[in-house]
Image (cartoon, rainbow, N blue to C red):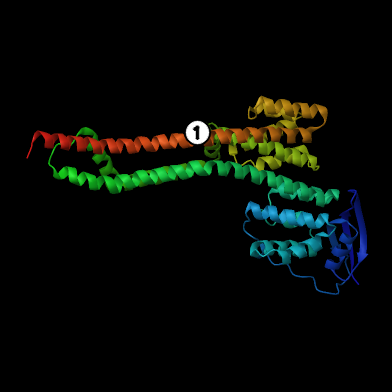
C-alpha cells in the first residue's frame, strides 16, 4: 500500500509533517482533514505504487471558468464557510457544493477546485488557476487561513468583506440609476421632438411664404444639421473615442486620465471616498488575518483599479521598505486626507492598527453615502432644467412663427 508524506497546519497553527499509508491520494487527503489539519503539501513516497491510478488533471484552459459575478462569488464563499464552520472537511464541503449548485459555472468551479485538492494541491493554489474569479487579495487570505489553521474563520471574514464591498458598489450604482435614466429619457425626448415634430410644423410655416422670425430660422437650421449631418457627429465621436483608447493604452496616458477622473467635481469626490473606504476596510481585514503590511500594500496596489493611485501606493510601499512609517509614507504622496492619516497614526502608536482601519472605513463609508445622496439629489434638477431649456427654445421658435403668421393674417384681412 502506498505511503504519502504530507505537510499541514493544525488548529493551533503549528506545522505538522508526517507519513501516512493509504490506498490513494484522495484517501490520504480525507484522513488528514479528519484530523482537523489543513494540508499544505502531499507527495507520494518514491517506490510505492498506488493501488488506484492517479486521476488525470485536465488542462487549466479546460477547467477554467472565465468569470463570475460578485454575487455568485459571495454565495460560494458564504456556502463554503458555513460548511467548514459546521465541522466538515474541505474535501467534503466542496463535494457537497458540487451537488448543491445548479449554476453550471459554479458547479464547474467546485469540480475543478475539488479535483485539485484530490491531486494534493492546497485550496489557495487551486484558486490561483482562476484569476478572473479570485482576486490576489482573496487568494492570499485563503493562504493565510490555511497556514494558520483557521480557514473557517477566514472564510467568515471574507464573507463580511465581500458583503461590505458589494454593498458599497450597490449603493453607488443605485444612487446614480435615476439620474442616468432621467438623462437618457430627456435626450430621447429632445431628439424625437427635433427630428419628428419640428419638421411637420415647419412644413406648414414655409407654405405660407412669409418671412420666418430669427428664432424659427435658428430652430430650422439646428434641425437641418441634426438630420442631414448626424453622421459627422458620429464620426467625430468615434474618432475622439479611438484617440482616448490609444492615449489610455500608454502607462503615462492612463495615469493622467485616472488622475483627471479624481479631480472631476462631484464624481471625483465619490471615487476618492470610495477608495478611502475600500483601502481602509481591506487593509484592516488583511492585517487582522495575519498578512504582512508590505504584502497587504502590494495587494492593495493590484485592486486599486486606478493607475494614478497604484503609482502612489507603490511609492509608499517603497518608502515603507526603507524604514518609513506607513502614515508618514502616505502623507508624502498627498493621496489621503489628513483625518485618515491622523487616525492611522493613532492606530500605529496604540498597537490597534486593524481595529483603527476598520473604524476609518466606517467613517468614509458614511461620508461616501452622504456625498452620493447629495449628488444624486442635485443631478435630477439640473437635468430637468437642461431639458426644459431646450424644449423651451424649441417651443419659443415655433410660437414665434405662429405669432408672426397671425400678425400677417391680421394685417391682410380676407
Indicate left or right for 310 with 389 as reference.
right
Residue at image coords 73%, 33%: 359
Number of marks drawn? 1
- Residue 50 placed where, x, y %? 85, 72
What is the quadrant of residue 6 in the picture? bottom right
Q: Quadrant of the N terminus?
A: bottom right
Where is 334 relative to 158, above or below?
A: above
Where is 245 relative to 352, above or below?
A: below
Is there any visible trace of residue 264 in the rendered image?
Answer: yes
Front residue (pair 242, 233): 233
Asked which secondary structure carries label 1, the reply is: helix
- Residue 107 placed where, x, y %? 69, 64
What is the quadrant of residue 353 in the picture? top right
- Residue 334 placed where, x, y %? 63, 27
What is the quadrant of residue 270 in the picture? top right
Residue at image coords 24%, 48%: 200
Circle 1 residues within 10 Å: few <14, some 14–19, many ≥20: few
Residue furthest toward the front?
414
- Residue 399 placed where, x, y %? 24, 37
Indicate left or right for 151 with 365 as reference.
right
Where is 61 relative to 325, above or below?
A: below
Front residue (pair 165, 250): 165
Is there any visible trace of residue 239 in the rendered image?
Answer: no
Residue at image coords 79%, 29%: 348
Q: Quadrant of the C terminus?
A: top left
User: Which residue lies under the disc numbered 1?
Assistant: 378
Where is 106 relative to 53, above or below?
A: above
Front residue (pair 324, 299): 299
Amino acid at each position: 500500500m502506498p505511503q504519502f508524506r504530507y505537510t499541514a497546519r493544525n488548529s493551533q497553527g503549528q506545522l505538522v509533517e508526517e507519513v501516512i499509508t493509504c490506498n490513494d491520494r484522495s484517501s490520504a487527503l480525507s484522513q488528514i482533514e479528519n484530523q482537523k489539519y489543513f494540508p499544505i503539501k502531499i507527495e507520494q513516497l518514491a517506490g510505492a505504487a498506488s493501488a488506484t491510478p492517479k486521476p488525470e488533471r485536465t488542462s487549466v484552459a479546460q477547467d477554467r471558468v472565465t468569470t463570475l459575478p460578485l454575487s455568485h462569488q459571495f454565495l460560494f464563499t458564504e456556502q463554503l464557510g458555513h460548511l467548514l464552520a459546521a465541522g466538515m472537511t474541505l474535501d467534503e464541503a466542496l463535494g457537497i457544493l458540487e451537488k448543491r449548485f445548479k449554476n453550471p459555472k459554479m458547479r464547474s468551479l467546485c469540480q475543478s477546485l475539488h479535483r485539485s485538492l484530490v491531486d494534493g494541491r492546497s485550496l489557495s493554489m487551486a484558486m490561483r488557476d482562476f484569476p478572473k474569479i479570485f482576486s490576489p487579495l482573496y487568494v492570499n487570505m485563503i493562504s493565510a487561513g490555511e497556514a494558520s489553521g483557521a480557514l473557517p474563520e477566514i472564510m467568515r471574514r471574507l464573507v463580511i468583506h465581500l458583503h461590505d464591498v458589494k454593498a458599497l458598489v450597490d449603493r453607488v450604482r443605485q444612487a446614480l440609476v435615476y439620474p442616468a435614466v432621467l438623462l437618457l429619457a430627456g435626450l430621447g425626448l429632445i431628439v424625437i421632438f427635433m427630428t419628428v415634430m419640428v419638421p411637420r410644423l415647419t412644413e406648414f410655416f414655409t407654405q405660407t411664404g412669409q418671412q420666418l422670425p430669427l428664432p424659427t430660422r435658428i430652430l430650422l437650421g439646428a434641425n437641418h444639421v441634426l438630420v442631414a449631418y448626424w453622421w459627422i457627429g458620429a464620426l467625430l465621436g468615434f474618432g475622439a473615442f479611438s484617440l482616448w483608447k490609444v492615449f489610455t493604452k500608454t502607462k503615462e496616458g492612463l495615469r493622467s486620465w485616472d488622475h483627471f477622473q479624481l479631480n472631476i467635481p462631484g464624481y471625483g469626490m465619490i471615487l476618492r471616498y470610495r477608495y478611502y473606504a475600500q483601502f481602509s476596510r481591506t487593509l484592516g481585514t488583511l492585517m487582522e488575518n495575519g498578512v504582512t503590511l508590505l504584502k497587504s500594500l502590494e495587494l492593495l496596489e493590484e485592486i486599486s483599479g486606478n493607475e494614478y493611485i497604484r503609482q502612489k501606493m507603490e511609492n509608499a510601499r517603497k518608502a515603507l521598505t526603507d524604514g518609513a512609517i506607513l502614515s508618514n509614507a502616505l502623507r508624502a504622496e498627498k493621496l489621503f486626507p489628513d483625518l485618515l492619516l491622523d487616525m492611522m497614526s493613532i492606530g500605529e502608536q496604540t498597537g490597534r492598527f486593524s481595529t483603527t482601519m476598520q473604524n476609518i472605513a466606517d467613517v468614509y463609508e458614511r461620508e461616501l453615502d452622504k456625498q452620493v445622496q447629495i449628488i444624486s439629489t442635485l443631478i435630477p434638477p439640473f437635468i430637468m432644467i437642461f431639458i426644459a431649456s431646450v424644449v423651451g427654445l424649441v417651443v419659443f421658435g415655433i410660437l414665434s412663427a405662429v405669432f408672426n403668421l397671425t400678425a400677417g393674417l391680421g394685417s391682410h384681412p380676407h
